[in-house]
Amino acid sequence: MTSLPHPPADQIELAHVLAALGDETRLAIIGLLANGEQDAMTCSQFLHLGSKTGLSYHLAKLREAGLVNVRPEGTKRMISLRRTDLDRRFPGFLDSIIACRAVGPKPGKAQD
């Protein structure tokens, strides 16, 4: 299995990061990675969020934007949050997104 392309840390663009985070499934993936006790998670740990095809699409968008690192490990793909790169590039941004996600409205819930 070949390595997947990831943008270098200094080339992660805020517009691409924001576009990638504009989807509830991708926000949920980022939340799980940020709150996870593991350094990396497998694709199968996200199956409750959608189909394998859908997850592949969402993970590719997150990888291309520079939010996650996807590394092949045998037959699995290990996904990890690029927290260090993101914190260096946009200090406090990722923590703000995660905090807003934790207290924000949940999908399907009516707002007052």
Image: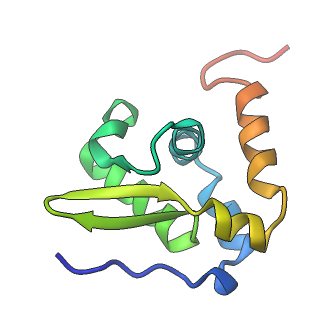
At 46% across and 66% down in the image, what residue appears? 69
Q: Is residue 3 above or below residue 80?
A: below
On the picture, is 55 further left or further right than 97?
A: left
Q: Is residue 53 above or below residue 101?
A: below
- Quarter holding the C terminus is top right
Quadrant in the picture for residue 85: bottom right
* x and y percentages locating residue 7 in the rendered image: 54, 82
At 45% across and 42% down in the image, what residue appears? 38
Figure colour scheme: rainbow
Q: Is residue 108 above or below residue 66?
A: above
On the picture, is 12 further left or further right than 26?
A: right
At 26% across and 67% down in the image, what residue appears? 72
At 65% across and 52% down in the image, what residue appears? 22
Quadrant in the picture for residue 17: bottom right
- Quarter holding the N terminus is bottom left
* x and y percentages locating residue 79 in the rendered image: 40, 56
In this view, the residue in front, 44 or 112, is 44
* x and y percentages locating residue 91 in the rendered image: 84, 63
In this view, the residue in front, 52 or 43, is 43
**How many marks are shown on the rendered structure?**
0
